[in-house]
Image: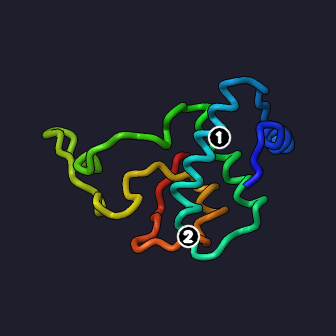
Amino acid sequence: MAATLEGWISYAAARGDAIANDEQSAAALVRGADFIEFFYVQNFATSPAPEVIDAAIYEAAKIELGTPGLFNRVYTPGEARVLTEVKGIKWTAVGDAKAEGALSPTSTKIEAMLGQYVSRKTGLGMRSLG
């Protein structure tokens, strides 16, 4: 992986986004790289081209820049629930909260880039950040 702040600025500019060359952007790039490394790269069954990994890092960094710490959430598996009744305010657990990656935020774009290379017992499912 050769993701750099300069590379991210160029990648973003090609997509109509502007990334500042500052400490906040650099920190978001590190957090994005950490997420990609620990959630995807360590689970690769086959490896994509380095450019694909770098692009995924830039996408994760963009998310981290907008919402610092999003990929480093602290949660309890019991939090995985949906509102199923309004009058009585009833919540129902969803999916298997104990499944690998079940409560991790997932970008559909990053998943499209790297999901095919990941070997997971349960898969990542269809979760989205937007």
Crowding around mark 1 (Cα neighbors within 10 Å: few <14, some 14 to 19, many 20+) is: many
Q: Kindly indicate the quadrant of the structure image that contains residue 44.
A: bottom right
Residue name at image x 55 percent, y 70 percent = 118
Tell me if 95 is positioned left or right of 10 in this view.
left
| Disc 1 target residue | 61
Q: Give the total number of marks visible in the rendering.
A: 2
Q: Can residue 16 be seen in this view?
A: no
Residue 57 position in % (x across, y down):
67, 49
Place residue 9 in its image quadrant.
top right
**Amino acid under disc 1:** Ala
Answer with the quarter of the image where residue 27 lies: top right
Q: Nearer the viewer, residue 104 or 42?
A: 42
Q: Look at mark 2 in the image and give the residue it sits on.
A: 118
Who comes first in sequence, dot 2 or dot 1? 1
The amino acid beneath tag 2 is Val
Relative to 54, say whether 119 is above or below: below
Q: Is mark 1 on a helix, strand or loop?
A: helix
Q: In the shown orientation, is residue 72 left or right of residue 60?
A: left
